[in-house]
Amino acid sequence: MQVKETRNDGLKRGYQFTLPAADLAATVDAKLKEAQPEVEMKGFRKGKVPMAMLKKQFGPRILGDAMQDAIDGALKKHLDTSGDRPATQPKVEMENGDGWKEGDDVVVNVSYEALPAIPEVDLSTLTLEKLTVPAEDAAIAEALENLAKSAQTFEDRRKGSKAKDGDQVVIDFKGFVDGEAFEGGAGEDYPLVLGSNSFIPGFEDQLVGAKDGDDVTVTVTFPAEYGAKHLAGKEATFECTVKAVKAPKAAEIDDELAKKFGAEDLDGLKKQIADRLEQEYAGAARAILKRSLLDQLDEKVKFDLPESLVEAEAHQIAHQLWHEENPEVHDHNHGSIDPTDEHKTLAERRVRLGLLLAEIGQKAEVTVTDQEMTQAVLRAARQYPGQERAFFEFVQQNQQVQQQLRAPIFEDKVVDLIAEQAKVEEKTVTKEELEKAVEALDEL
């Protein structure tokens, strides 16, 4: 096998591999001789089939396998010798493939972008702030009030009282479109909380001010994106009878409320709330620390980036943002989405930091354990209730999905590793200060 360099431009590499026809023929003959003792063919005893007949019947397939094996082996040997790590799958093209015939040398052109050499970075020069926020009494009290509201009950208002926003009205209703009742448009003794936005937009507003015993005709228009297409965008009238008007009554903040939420008593519930709040604060503080860490690495470490990786990442960013701006489109049947300069800049940052974190993690022998992967799969499976088994099987058969689940775990472990070597100053802040710092992340 002869190897000739055809390109060495930055990270772009090109090589021409030439496999002599004589070497190929020798490989084919060797494989046929190896297989000959086990071959059976009509008219011949086992192992006695002439080589000429074997070559005629099996030669083309063996020749193809030999060519592929030779090319794969030559590429592997080249990469092992050169130390190159292709950023993406190398492009392999056979020269004069259409006109090639047995007996000709095989000439293959190989091209790829090599991953860059990642420079060393002194992690001890990073300076980070680790924010801590204690669960303040006011925040605990606010959480308790929200729990009490969520556990609220409703009591009948005085006879003749008008329904207010937040009240519950018990109604019978029947809906009509174009004068005809439609399926699913009727109900009896339905408890509707005004202002809950659980009915068609505008429906609940027209019941504000109604009294027990009132008959109210509600006129609304179904949203254009309504799930039932035969109703989408259509005007409907509902004949409603108000059977009761009830006022909300928040639950008492006491031991009984605590027991409803799985605590032994009120003090136990307060402790649960404090722990949950501090976990939420710690998660937000970690996001802030991680952003600062990545910003400093991005500023300190510069190296050439493979254009193919940057381009692929920029297209992915553009595609993702487009779907966020067009949530009604759930498929990929749309026109091409070209990345902007802003997308490319963000892509460069992501690729640079991804390569850097991967290098740091590999050198430190950071790994993702089977248990961590199992937990990640379980968390992801919760998004598909009732289909968990099918999701597990899908993940087992899909290496790309496994990598998508593994990557954030690996990254977080590398971030923890870096933070251990950086200079970290702990700082206690208020909830409001933490919220401002989180908001600042979105502005960057």
Image: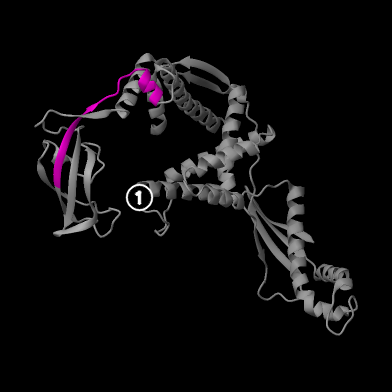
**40 over 375 or under it: above or below:** below
Q: Tell me the element at label 1.
A: loop
Of residues 152 and 387, the one drawn nearer to the viewer in this rendering: 152
Which corner quadrant of the image does residue 419 belong to? top right
Q: Which residue is mark 1?
A: 326
Task: Identify the image quadrant of the N terminus.
Answer: bottom right
- Residue 304 coordinates in the image, percent (x, y): 59, 42
Q: Does the rendering let one see residue 226?
A: yes
Residue 302 seen anywhere in this rendered image of the structure:
no
Tell which of 177 and 291 is nearer to you: 177
Magenta residues, as a range? Answer: 240-260
Q: Quadrant of the C terminus?
A: top left
Location of residue 280 by image quarter: top left
Query: What amino acid type is highlighted by mark number 1?
Result: Asn
Looking at the image, residue 59 lies above or below residue 234:
below
Which of the 4 image quadrants contains residue 25?
A: bottom right
Residue 392 rendering spot, x and y as whole percentages: 57, 48
Residue drawn at (65%, 36%) of the image? 369
Identify the residue at horizontal 73%, vertical 56% (top origin): 75
- Answer with left or right where residue 49 lies relative to residue 354: right
Query: Residue 116 location in percent, x, y?
Result: 63, 43
Magenta stretch containing residue 257, yes or no?
yes
Comparing 114 with 439, the one in front is: 439
Please say if 315 is above or below 424.
Answer: below
